[in-house]
Image (cartoon, grey):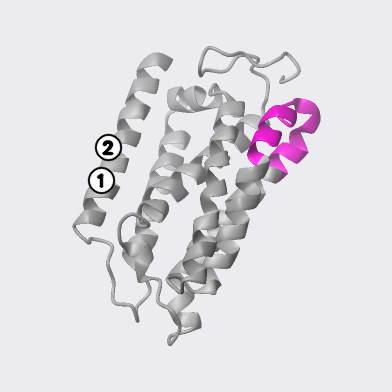
Amino acid sequence: MTNAKYGKLTAGLIAAWFFFSLTASALHAFRTDPSSPPLPLGLAVLIPIALFLLWFARSQQFRQFTLMLNPRILTIVQAWRIAGFVFLALYTYRILPGTIALPAGWGDIIIGATAPLVAMKLVNSDYRKGFILWQLLGIADLVTAVSLGTTATLINPHGIPTSAMTELPLSLIPTFAVPLFLILHLICIAQARQWKQQQYLGFGAHLPSSVA
């Protein structure tokens, strides 16, 4: 399969994934009892990541396709996470507990605010370690948010429930945005570990020869 076909296939799968998350949320498939951990939501986060890792490990063509994606574009997409201020607002209005809202909110704001700088300055073999470190911090933020979200009721059974995250529109964050952002981090780390390709797919832009 050519890279162009993989690009269309990937775009189609992402669109189908979004539609599934939207439909399942509308049908309340992720709703759980406020006193119970939101396990369906946790599975919705883990399954796409597991499928990506399996595909990446088993298919050389798919692996080559992902490694040729433009790391600047993959990184700057993370700028959307500056919208994490929404978590702070939800905490202020007592819709989400501080256990999840504060670390998730501030973590996303920091990653989102620094994403453009990282995309412009660190996509270079000279800054490989810094680039990978930033990606790892982005992953840590996502993992922390999901972990706290699924265990918040166990930590404080009588506190504010996390049930709002199982309903639209917030449910799209853990069921679609979080695993997608984490996958982009993983791809960037895999790219940085090699950085032997000087040409990357995406919007017709080539990276400078320093990325090698």
| Residue at image coords 35%, 61% | 41
Taking 28 as reference, is 83 left or right? right
Q: Against 9, is 198 above or below?
A: above
Would you say the residues marked 2 and 1 are in contact, meaning their CB atoms lie under 8 Å apart? yes
Reply yes or no: does residue 118 show up in magenta.
Answer: yes
> In this orientation, does residue 142 appear?
yes
Distance between mark 2 and mark 1 Cα atoms: 6 Å
Identity of the amino acid at label 2? Ala
Residue 113 in percent (x, y) is at: 65, 44
Give the position of the C terminus as an image quadrant: top right
Residue 130 in percent (x, y) is at: 76, 40
Taking 124 as reference, is 72 left or right? left
Q: Which residues are magenta?
A: 115-133
Identity of the amino acid at label 1? Phe
Which residue was labeled with disc 1?
Answer: 20
Q: Against 1, is 174 above or below?
A: below
For label 2, count other residues whose C-alpha is less than 10 Å away and answer few (under 14), some (14-19) or many (20+).
few
Secondary structure, mark 2, is helix
Indicate the quadrant where residue 167 lies.
bottom left
Residue 29 in percent (x, y) is at: 23, 60
Give the position of the N terminus as an image quadrant: top left
Q: Against 189, is 43 above or below?
A: below
Q: Against 122, is 198 above or below?
A: above
Indicate the quadrant where residue 88 lies.
bottom right
Reply yes or no: does residue 200 show up in magenta.
Answer: no
| Residue at image coords 43%, 79% | 160
Which residue was labeled with disc 2?
Answer: 16
> In this orientation, does residue 1 appear?
no
